[in-house]
Image: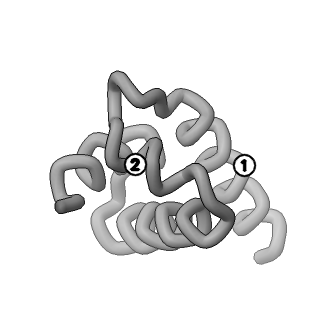
Amino acid sequence: MENVENQLRTAIFEALKKVTPENSPKVWKELQTKSGYKFIENKIIYMVINDHITPDACVPQIEVEML
């Protein structure tokens, strides 16, 4: 089980490395702190499990949902 968790966290990390202030400004701003990163990571984990979408597909959806 831990291997699956590590694989998911790695996939999330790779997806979040692609976030820039230009393509997802709200998510990018959130990622600038450790607590913000954990918040976004947890949202992506939830979405992957419940909505069955990839970490890359989660980022634009989170961007739209953020106020």
In percent of the image, x 33 and y 47: which residue is there?
26
Closer to the camera in the image, 22 or 49: 22
Among the 4 quarters of the image, the one containing residue 34: bottom right
Image quarter (top left, top right, bottom left or bottom right) of the C terminus: bottom left
Q: Indicate which label's residue lies in the foreground, 1 or 2.
A: 2
On the picture, is 11 further left or further right than 53? right
Find residue 52 and report its horizontal and vertical position in percent: 35, 60
Please say if 45 is above or below 31.
below
For label 2, count other residues whose C-alpha is less than 10 Å away and answer few (under 14), some (14-19) or many (20+).
Answer: many
Residue underneath mark 2: 27
Amino acid of disc 1: Thr
The numbered mark, 1 or 2, whose residue comes first in the sequence reads 1
In percent of the image, x 48 and y 33: which residue is there?
19
Element class at badge 1? helix
Amino acid of disc 2: Val
Residue occupying the far top of the picture: 22
In percent of the image, x 46 and y 28: which residue is there?
20
Residue underneath mark 1: 10
Element class at badge 2? helix
For label 1, count other residues whose C-alpha is less than 10 Å away and answer few (under 14), some (14-19) or many (20+).
Answer: few
